């Protein structure tokens, strides 16, 4: 089982680096701000552009586990219009969205946002006022967007993994304005369905509304773990991402739940520009139409094969569960130090992951989930829901594991040269 990266009592990693505000990892001197993360992303884009120009588009391998492309098969261009598209596709989108998340047409509604993050933020804007509190409940830790959303609303935020602690927080006076439950955490630990149901019951018994952050869990929960669909769990409203695990993109957020809450979130979305462009509704409908739980299962199987191959090379520093394989950043830095024969860490664990990810992209065209978030929600070197066709195209699990192992060794040789690491990550 993947272990949590958060250690609430210490707020620091095993190397003594304190976690950055709002993040489950420490920042270092190379990647000290979100602005630095953006520069790193620009460097990655430069690498992708150069590889495609020199070697063709087949030289890039998407091992992020995400599908963020725009598929418009059979959609005529005149339909891609902000007024026409919702008129033609709006009703079917609502029906498919409610079916996807387990809603009831008589009482629930759907809204599409430019990201799942935007959907979660809009719900906070609609439901939380300054001076109130928000409680997060998850298998390990809530996504940073939850704490940031609470802060932007002027509310305090407390995160917990304990039902006992959740109950204590919900019994406080005044009661929290909102409980945000995460089914599949950023660490890829799954919340057992019974715990999820108990969390919702704790909130509702005290008159507290409940939001489910189901970014990836909306499909993984039912397809892999046999759990109920999001709104069948009793939450008031749920948000998911359409680029995750079985859907085909684009990267948009889908919110569904109680009609009154969705209406309020929709209003805030239009006020702050958080809504998805309606011209993209045909792509959303296509993505929901084509969703298949079997696609999720196939990706889990491919990821599991990589886990076995990587563990054979790196050992117990590789951790995996049913849906992911990762080398947590602190373990990765420890591995690098061991291979370098050093005890002096010139960078923080998050930067070690960034450096390995950049080398994988630079030398092999491997695109990892590390580049998908800004800042990333996890510091781990993470692989999940790998496309089996993409994996076969690369050469299979052993080929990918060999590449990762070799790049860790090569990075270890450069570990003492901070200027070289800086150029690797930031020189555009």
Image: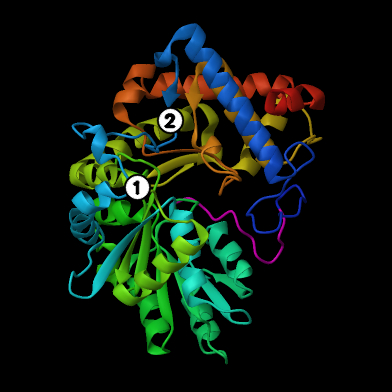
Residue 110 image-quadrant placement: bottom left
- Between residue 247 and residue 333, name the one nearer to us: 247
Membership of 3 in magenta stretch: yes
Which residue is depicted at the point 26% across and 47% down? 85
Callouts 1 and 2 close, C-beta under 8 Å = no
SS category of the residue bearing label 2:
loop
- Between residue 361 and residue 160, name the one nearer to us: 361
Which disc is residue 242 wearing? 1
Total numbered labels placed on residues in the image:
2
- Between residue 205 and residue 255, name the one nearer to us: 255
Extent of the magenta region: 1-12
Characterize the magenta stretch by its predominant secondary structure.
loop
Q: Position of residue 128 (x, y in %)?
A: 53, 77
Q: Position of residue 229 (x, y in %)?
A: 25, 62
Disc 1 residue crowd, few under 14, some 14–19, many 20+, Cα 10 Å? many
Q: Position of residue 314 (x, y in %)?
A: 54, 30
Q: Earlier in the sequence, mark 1 or mark 2?
A: 2
- Between residue 339 and residue 248, name the one nearer to us: 248
**CA separation in Å, label 1 and label 2:** 17 Å
Which disc is residue 63 wearing? 2
Membership of 329 in magenta stretch: no
Q: Does residue 405 appear in the picture of this structure?
A: no
SS category of the residue bearing label 1:
loop
- Left or right: residue 411 compared with residue 144: right
Q: Position of residue 80 (x, y in %)?
A: 29, 39
Which disc is residue 318 wearing? none
Q: Is residue 58 above or below residue 43?
A: above
């Amino acid at each position: 089982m993947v272990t949590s990266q958060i250690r609430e009592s210490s707020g620091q990693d095993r190397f003594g680096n304190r976690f950055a505000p709002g993040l489950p990892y420490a920042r270092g001197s190379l990647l000290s701000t979100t602005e630095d993360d953006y520069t790193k992303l620009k460097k990655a884009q430069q690498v992708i552009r150069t590889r495609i120009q020199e070697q063709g588009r087949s030289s890039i391998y998407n091992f992020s586990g995400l599908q963020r492309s725009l598929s418009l098969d059979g959609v005529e261009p005149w339909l891609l219009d902000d007024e026409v598209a919702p008129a033609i596709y709006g009703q079917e989108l609502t029906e498919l969205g409610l079916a996807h998340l387990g809603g009831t047409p008589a009482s629930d509604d759907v809204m599409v946002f430019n990201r799942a993050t935007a959907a979660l933020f809009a719900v906070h804007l609609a439901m939380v006022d300054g001076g109130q509190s928000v409680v997060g409940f998850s298998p390990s830790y809530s996504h940073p967007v939850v704490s940031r959303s609470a802060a932007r609303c002027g509310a305090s935020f407390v995160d917990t993994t304990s039902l006992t602690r959740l109950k204590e927080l919900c019994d406080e006076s005044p009661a929290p304005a909102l409980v945000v439950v995460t089914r599949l955490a950023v660490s890829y630990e799954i919340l057992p369905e019974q715990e999820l149901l108990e969390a919702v019951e704790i909130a509702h018994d005290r008159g507290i509304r409940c939001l489910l952050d189901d970014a990836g869990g909306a499909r993984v929960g039912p397809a892999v773990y046999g759990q109920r669909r999001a709104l069948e769990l009793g939450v008031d409203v749920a948000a998911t991402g359409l680029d995750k695990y079985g859907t085909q993109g684009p990267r948009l957020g889908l919110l569904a739940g109680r009609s009154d809450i969705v209406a309020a979130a929709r209003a805030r979305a239009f006020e702050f520009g958080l809504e998805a462009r309606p011209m993209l509704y045909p792509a959303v409908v296509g993505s929901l139409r084509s969703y298949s739980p079997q696609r999720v299962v196939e990706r889990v199987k491919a990821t599991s094969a990589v886990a076995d191959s990587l563990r054979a090379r790196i050992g117990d520093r590789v951790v995996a569960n049913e849906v992911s394989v990762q080398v947590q950043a602190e373990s990765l830095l420890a591995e690098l130090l061991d291979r370098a024969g050093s005890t002096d860490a010139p960078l923080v664990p998050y930067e070690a992951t960034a450096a390995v990810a950049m080398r994988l992209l630079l030398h092999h065209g491997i695109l990892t989930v590390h580049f998908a978030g800004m800042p990333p929600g996890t510091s781990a070197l993470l692989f999940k829901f790998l496309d089996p066709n993409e994996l076969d195209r690369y050469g299979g699990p052993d080929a990918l594991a060999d590449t990762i192992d070799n790049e860790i060794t090569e990075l270890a040789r450069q570990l003492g040269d901070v200027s070289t690491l800086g150029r690797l990550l930031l020189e555009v």
